[in-house]
Image (cartoon, rainbow, N blue to C red):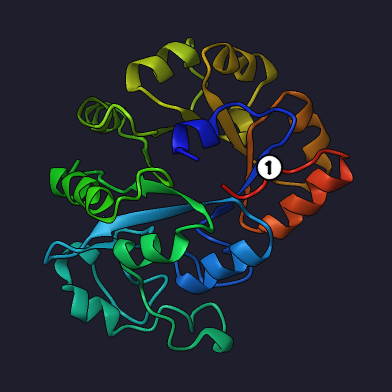
Amino acid sequence: MAAPEFLRSRRDAPHVSAHRGASAKAPENTLAALEAAWRDGATLAEIDVRLTRDGHVVLMHDRSADRTTTGRGPVERMTLDELRALDAGTWFGAAFRGERVPTLREVIAWARGKLVLLVELKNYPFHEVPLVERTVELIDATGSAEYVVPAGFDHVALREIKRRRPGWAVEMIYNARLADPAGAARATGAALVSLEPQFALAEDVSLLHAADVAALTTLERPEDAARLLSWGLDVLESDDPGMAVAAIRAAGVRLSPPG
């Protein structure tokens, strides 16, 4: 199933997205976290990508490797070999000692037939064009557009991706309440819009659905699931996708099957 169809509004059968993988159970943005997400029933996974000094796209949320690896310094100043030499798991727990920073190419290969990937482009504050270019090249080279969705806060970059690859789905993220969310989604070409929990409101979800745009928000507490699902949220995201799966089932709503 192509990503635009997979993400299109399915109010009777929502999806669960794992934020940075199952980051409550395993070190974020690693294959261990993605494996845990898949086992827990997630159908999507949000991951973050950055570019190394030698032009490789790797999974990393922060600009610096300090928080989630044994290394120090900005990712863009490290080669892939230098980054791969770091331990990306011990900070989370001894059981994950030796976990490595994966490349996007590795994750795309692993995810085929398992999860749709929402790939947040960390191309700010410098708006690096090479990161966008390399990500587009990777999706093309791996033939993975049906399950890899470029995402981000840089809506101009997303619009350019959509102009160049009109058949692709893109995800628009923002941290505000927009006066015209459907208009913004149309301007970007987004098939999916991520709403921060504090700005997720029923009327905005309705406006997005009327424009045939799917809506995602974070499920912060299990008891919130029934309310969010009553609005027709298409995707509930969580650091703990197993919790989200259980909360949806407890609300008496069936889940969308994997793509």
- The residue closer to the viewer here, 42 or 183, is 42
Residue 133 appears anywhere in the view: yes
In the displayed structure image, the side of residue 233 where residue 181 appears, left or right: left
Query: Looking at the image, which residue sits at the far front?
Result: 1
Q: Residue 179, percent across and down?
A: 49, 10
Would you place residue 11 above or below residue 127 in this image?
Answer: above
| Few, some or many residues within 10 Å of mark 1 (<14, 14–19, 20+) | some
Q: Residue furthest left?
A: 54
Q: Quadrant of residue 166?
A: top left
Q: Residue at x 60, y 62 (%)?
A: 37
Query: Residue tagged by mark 1?
Result: 256
> Helix or strand or loop: what does disc 1 sit on?
loop
Q: What residue is drawn where x is 37% and y is 39%?
A: 152
Amino acid carrying mark 1 in the image: Ser
Residue 233, relative to residue 241: is it above or below?
above
Q: Is residue 197 left or right of residue 154?
A: right
- Please state if 29 lies on the left or on the right of 81 as rendered: right
Q: Nearer the viewer, residue 145 or 87?
A: 145
Position of 195 relative to 28 (above/below): above
Q: Is residue 174 visible?
A: no
User: Which residue appears at 58% of the width and 88% of the height?
Assistant: 95
Q: Residue at x 72, y 36 (%)?
A: 13
Residue 147 point in image, percent of width and height = 43, 47
Q: Position of residue 193 (x, y in %)?
A: 49, 29
Q: Quadrant of residue 72?
A: bottom left
Of residues 6 and 220, the one nearer the viewer is: 6
